[in-house]
Amino acid sequence: MRMGAIDIGTNSMRLLICDYVDGELLNRKKLVNTTRIGKGVDENGFIREDAIRRNLDALKEFYDLSKAEGCEKLYCIGTSALRDSKNSDDFIKRAKLEVGIDVDVVSGNDESNLGFLGVLKGANEDKDILVVDIGGGSTEFILGNFEGIKFAKSENVGALRMTEKFLTTDIVDDYEFDMMSEFIEEEIKNTIDYLKEKEINKLVGIGGTITSLSAINQELEIYSMEKIHNSQINIDEIEKILQNLKKMTLNDKKSLKGLQSKRADIITAGVKILHIIMKKLELSDIVVSEYDNLEGLICQKAKKMS
């Protein structure tokens, strides 16, 4: 069966189209649109009208595309920004009215579950893995294995949220960067302390920050799901990229190989979140997965139908 899944994230909206055949996801195709529904939400608690319009237009595009691709089923979830905003109901009503699609705003815990389900679909791992999903508005931590999830926590530190809250200059200001780092460390401290006591056999990363980091590390001219999936990045490579990003202007970042220009303004904050997590947990490598909450959503829905 041809199926589609849309994720309306804080920074970007993504679409997965694939064939679900005997429990496998075949002919996967992914599209992304940097729609920034979460722009300003952390500051004033509301999704701005221009962001609503931008996201409804993008949603319509993805809806039409999925129908043109022959999707029999199309599912749509909203995450951090839609969870946090006071007017998310307004967006959901308009999405139904104008596009004809039901947007399901998932909890941080459900988002974690979907991400983990997706990673397992693309991994061959029987021991405990820690999945980290750095989004625009939040970061999810999920520990578990094929038998199930042992721990899941959503923390309100994301690449867009941290950038808006702390980083105001073109070339990153050291003082602002240090303030941001301290804030991240404090926010995730309890989660880190809990995970330090656990045996983590492998760290797996999903989400735009981590896939972009892999693309930068590989200096990819053109983004390739195949080259990103199961690629590895070590802490030394992350530190080197982070130091470079801190010295760059926004225009420098926009022309950086492997980085989408629309992600250039938030990449530094996103990479720092990952850097702190790995340092605190004393993990030297991360494996990047191209299977994430979109694949998880398709698997979850398909199982319910069978």
Image (cartoon, rainbow, N blue to C red):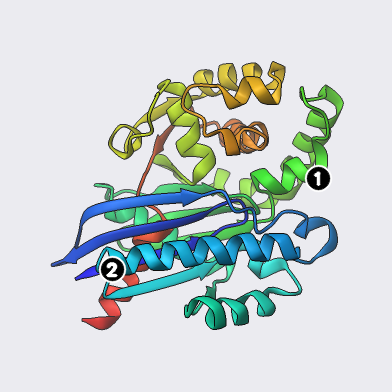
Q: Is residue 151 left or right of residue 185?
A: left
Assign the C terminus to one quadrant of the image.
Answer: bottom left
Front: mark 2 or 1? 2
Helix, strand or loop for disc 2: strand
Within-10-Å neighbours for mark 1: few <14, some 14–19, many 20+? few
Q: Is residue 80 visible?
A: yes
Q: Is residue 184 left or right of residue 245?
A: right
The answer to whether the residues at label 2 and label 1 have Cβ atoms under 8 Å apart is no
Query: What residue lies at 54% left-to-right and 24% top-to-bottom?
Result: 238
Query: What residue lies at 48% left-to-right and 62% top-to-bottom?
Result: 7
The picture places residue 103, in percent across and down from the top left corner, at 52, 75
Query: What residue lies at 36% left-to-right and 51% top-to-bottom?
Result: 30
Query: What residue lies at 67% left-to-right and 80% top-to-bottom?
Result: 89
The picture places residue 148, in percent across and down from the top left corner, at 36, 64
The picture places residue 42, in percent across and down from the top left corner, at 78, 57
Report, in whole angstroms, how far the alpha carbon at label 2 lies from the one at label 1. 37 Å
Residue wearing tag 1: 165
Picture disc at residue 3? 2
Quarter-wise, where is residue 64 in the image?
bottom left
The foreground one among 248 and 113 is 248
Helix, strand or loop for disc 1: helix
The picture places residue 285, in percent across and down from the top left corner, at 44, 29
Residue type (three-letter) at the residue carrying disc 2: Met
